[in-house]
Amino acid sequence: LKCMDGRIHLPYATKTPLGIVHPFRNLGGIFDLGWPYMGDLLESQVMEAIHQGRRVLIIITYHFSKGDKFRGCAGFNCDKDAAMVHANEIREQVEAIFGHGHKTVYPLVCGFETDEDALILHSSEGESLDLSTLEPDELDSLPVKLEGFFTDMPAQVRHDLLPLVEGNLRHIDEMRQLQRDLD
């Protein structure tokens, strides 16, 4: 679930082939699963995956710029905290619909810092893991780090999330290298 202004492009920022991530876009990333069509659409997608024997990772995003507050999300008047609060409200709605156990559907709140395209992962315990603070040489330790961070996430979902996290670390490194080359 993401803002439709175009700055959040998960396949690009995670080096994920197109077609794997199914985006739902709305102005400012503002959603309410009680909206008639929205709730039905999300439920239909989730149920289709479940009937195919798959688990579902719903990535609920918000975005901001660390370099300039006013490059943040206009839908929230460039207020990162307001965007985070809304993303957590959506997580709560997903849990109310699909359960708090997270065995089949896992709602992941994920920040997106647009200067470096860095992901900030939020656990259901309120912890955050800012991928811009990790180094590419930490790739080997990521499975253990994610297991400790997402204690309520099923192992298969963590396994499926891992390539996105690894891809984002590589992407952040490339963005930094590009910036060094420009400087």
Image (cartoon, rainbow, N blue to C red):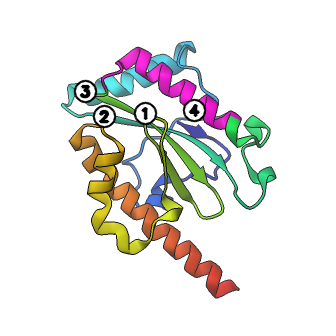
Among the two numbered marks 1 and 2 on one chain, the one whose residue lies closer to the N terminus: 1
Residue drawn at x 36%, y 32% as measured from the top left: 106
Q: Residues within 10 Å of mark 3 (few under 14, many from 20)?
A: some
Distance in Å between CA atoms under marks 3 and 2:
19 Å
Q: Which residue is mark 3?
A: 50
Q: Which residue is mark 1?
A: 124
Q: Secondary structure at mark 2?
A: loop
In depth, the one of 23 and 70 nearer the eye is 70
Disc 4 residue type (three-letter): Ala
Disc 1 residue type (three-letter): Ser
Q: Which residue is mark 4?
A: 87
How would you classify the magenta stretch by its main secondary structure? helix
Q: Is 46 rendered above or below residue 108?
A: above
The answer to whether the residues at label 1 and label 3 have Cβ atoms under 8 Å apart is: no
Distance in Å between CA atoms under marks 2 and 4:
19 Å
Residue 100 as seen in the image, left or right of residue 120: left
